[in-house]
């Protein structure tokens, strides 16, 4: 006998739709203006590292990064990525209305992060393997785009899966 996985999922309310629209618009604008956002984040991190007297460490870390991965400031890329992915997860949570499904989506994002880190480590330990760096770059680009949301939403949408008991 089949039963809906989430019979208790509440319908989307007008207030929730408004939050979804605002968050979707914010993610769209951040994505469209990513160069400006990266500029602001880079300057902010340079100021923070400068105040801490670690400006040289920031420059040295950047020089050790392959141009195949990124040419931007590492703290700026990490901050942008975390904020964008956090926004995507919040959007999915608002749409899915189920913390378990949100955890599944977060695990997908975490899996992509782990895969990216493994590829970067492989690229570094393997003597700067270009294919590993390029593949990790593609995963980064995929992760900080709307594509994971567009894939995860229909897969995790309440009522789209049935549990056989």
Image (spheres, helix red, strand yellow):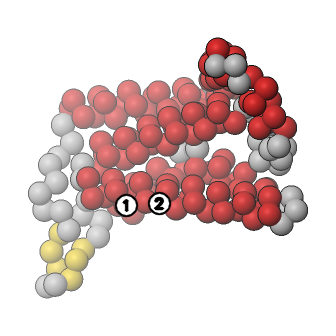
Other-residue count near label 1 (Cα within 10 Å), few / some / many at <14 / 14–19 / ≥20: few
Label 2 crowd (10 A; few <14 / some 14-19 / many >=20): some
Left or right: where 38 falls relative to 6? right
Q: Residue, x 45% and y 28% (percent of image)?
A: 25
Q: Considering the numbered disc 1 on the image, is that residue within a helix, a strand or a loop? A: helix
Is the residue under label 1 in contact with that under label 2 (CB below 8 Å)? yes
Residue 36 visible, this angle: no
User: Residue 104, which numbered label?
Assistant: 1
**Residue 145 in the image, given as x and y percentages of width and height:** 58, 44
Q: Residue at x 24, y 48 (%)?
A: 97
Q: Which residue is mark 2?
A: 108
Is residue 17 positioned above or below 51 on the image?
below
Estimate the x, y position of residue 127 in percent, counting from the top left.
88, 62
| In front of the other: 54 or 133 | 54
Tell me if residue 1 comes above or below residue 14 in the rendering.
below
Label 2 vs label 1: CA separation?
A: 6 Å
Q: Which mark is residue 51?
A: none
């Amino acid at each position: 006998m089949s039963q809906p996985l989430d019979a208790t999922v509440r319908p989307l309310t007008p207030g929730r739709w408004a939050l979804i629209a605002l968050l979707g618009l914010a993610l769209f604008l951040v994505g469209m203006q990513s160069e400006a956002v990266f500029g602001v984040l880079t300057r902010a991190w340079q100021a923070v590292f400068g105040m801490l007297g670690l400006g040289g460490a920031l420059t040295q870390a950047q020089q050790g990064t392959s141009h195949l991965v990124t040419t931007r400031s590492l703290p700026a890329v990490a901050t942008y990525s975390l904020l964008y992915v956090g926004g995507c997860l919040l959007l999915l949570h608002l749409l899915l209305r189920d913390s378990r499904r949100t955890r599944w989506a977060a695990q997908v994002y975490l899996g992509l992060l782990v895969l990216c880190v493994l590829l970067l480590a492989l690229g570094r330990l393997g003597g700067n393997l270009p294919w590993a760096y390029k593949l990790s770059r593609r995963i980064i680009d995929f992760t900080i785009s709307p594509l994971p949301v567009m894939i995860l939403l229909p897969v995790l949408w309440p009522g789209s899966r049935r549990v056989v008991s």
